Image (tube, grey):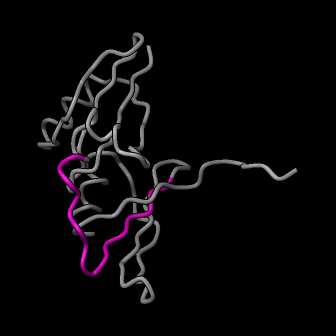
Amino acid sequence: MAEIIKALHTGISVLNMDEALNWYQENLDFSLVSDNYAEPLHARICFIKKGDYQIELFQYDFPTPLPDSRRMPNDDLQTVGTKHVAFEVDNMAEMKERLLKNHVDIAHEVMMEGNNVMFIRDNCGVLIELIQNN
């Protein structure tokens, strides 16, 4: 019987690829794997990675900005569809200090079942969840 082996990547559309590449490198330590233009899609596509995990970034020639309802974690959860990517961090206090230093938009912080959880927004407003498991 066929089965899924592992998660490969998450796709995220961005308004400006160069700004997004810089944001993900500076704030989450991702590095560029590939950078191509897909003529049939009319989009620049870049793969970035951190460890074994990759994100596929899309910049379409005429992108549509993220709706305001997708910028707030609790509001976004009510909309059907994919919600966010989550990363485990080893020290939330240090991560928060780093993100604040870089002027990253922190959307929400909460303790859930003893775990420290923080939602941030990337440079396009896309929600990303950070979790420090305790």
Give whichever of 124, 31 is nearer the camera: 124
For the point 31% across and 54% down, the residue is 25
Q: Is residue 118 magenta?
A: no
Q: In this view, does 114 lie to the left or right of 127?
A: right
Query: In the rendering, at what x and y percent does residue 17 appear?
Result: 27, 69
Query: In the rendering, at what x and y percent does residue 110 appear?
Result: 27, 19
**Relative height, residue 12 to residue 96 (above, below):** below
Question: Could you tell me how many numbered marks the image carries?
Answer: 0
**Relative height, residue 73 to residue 57 (above, below):** above
Return the residue found at the far top: 114
Q: Is residue 68 magenta?
A: yes
Query: In the rendering, at what x and y percent does residue 106 appear?
Result: 18, 35
Q: In which quarter of the image is the C terminus?
A: top left
**Relative height, residue 70 to residue 60 (above, below):** above
Return the residue found at the far bottom: 39
Give whichever of 63, 59 is nearer the camera: 63
For the point 38% across and 44% down, the residue is 84
Image quadrant of residue 11? Answer: bottom left
For the point 26% across and 61% down, the residue is 20
Q: Is residue 74 left or right of residue 11?
A: left
Give whichever of 124, 30 is nearer the camera: 124
Query: In the rendering, at what x and y percent does residue 73 appear?
Result: 28, 36
Q: In this view, does 22 lie to the left or right of 80?
A: left
Image quadrant of residue 107? Answer: top left
For the point 27% across and 31% down, the residue is 95
- Range of magenta residues: 54-69
